[in-house]
Amino acid sequence: MNKIAASRTDLSEVAGLVPPAAQALIAVIGLRATSELVRQLGGTTFAVPQRETRLGEAKFEALAEVVGPDAAMAMVRHFGGESLYIPRCRDALVEYIYRDIRQTFDRLTRDTSAIQAVSVLAVRYGYSDRHIWSILKMADRFGQAEQAVRAAGQLGLF
């Protein structure tokens, strides 16, 4: 993916696009630890250790380095002995990046032209300038539940 995906990402802004498996992880270990787990292990299946053997203890230590000792312990209590698929959360991450591009564009265009801002964004995110222009034309995406709430709120206008 691009540079932003490799940095710390807060999925709360795009929570409606997060898959159910990631939502279950968020409920157990919290948003920050889940974001880090997705960033480092997304798209893989992880055998959550039970800490009953040296190998299990070594796997626990490796997990604790990714999510922290408290979150790792919560995962062991809740998922110990299970093979757990860590989703990539691609839709949520792409939407997060696109929102960041639009926000950064707004900031940059306070002091520079739109063309200069797009050039900076294309280099920063590793996209073509044409793709940046198309991203700038997009509206924020929301999950189905959020869309339903927004639609219900809009019905009161008529």
Image: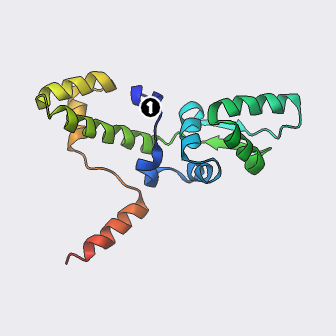
Residue 133 spot, x, y in % from top left: 20, 35
User: Quick one: which residue is furthest to the right in this view?
Assistant: 53
Give coordinates of residue 90: x percent, y percent. 46, 40
Residue displayed at 84% across by 37% down: 51
Q: Callout 1: few (<14), some (14-19), or many (20+) C-alpha neighbours within 10 Å?
A: some
Which of the pair 121/73 is nearer the observer? 73
How many marks overall? Answer: 1
Give the image quarter of residue 153: bottom left
Mark 1 highlights which residue? Answer: 5
Residue 47 coordinates in the image, percent (x, y) = 74, 38
Tell me the quadrant of the picture where the C terminus can be found: bottom left
Q: Quadrant of the N terminus?
A: top left
- 53 versus 10 height, above or below: above
Furthest toward the left, the residue is 113
Q: In this view, does 37 lie to the left or right of 59?
A: left
Could you tell me which residue is drawn at 56 percent across and 52 percent down? 23
Please say which color scheme the image uses: rainbow
Which residue occupies 52% across, 51% down?
A: 19
Element at badge 1?
A: helix
Q: What residue type is labelled 1?
A: Ala
Q: Is residue 111 left or right of residue 20?
A: left
Q: Which of 10 and 125 is in front in this view?
A: 10
Q: In this view, does 29 lie to the left or right of 48?
A: left
- Residue 29 in percent (x, y) is at 63, 47
Residue drawn at point x = 59 percent, y = 48 percent? 30
Q: In which quarter of the image is residue 146?
A: bottom left
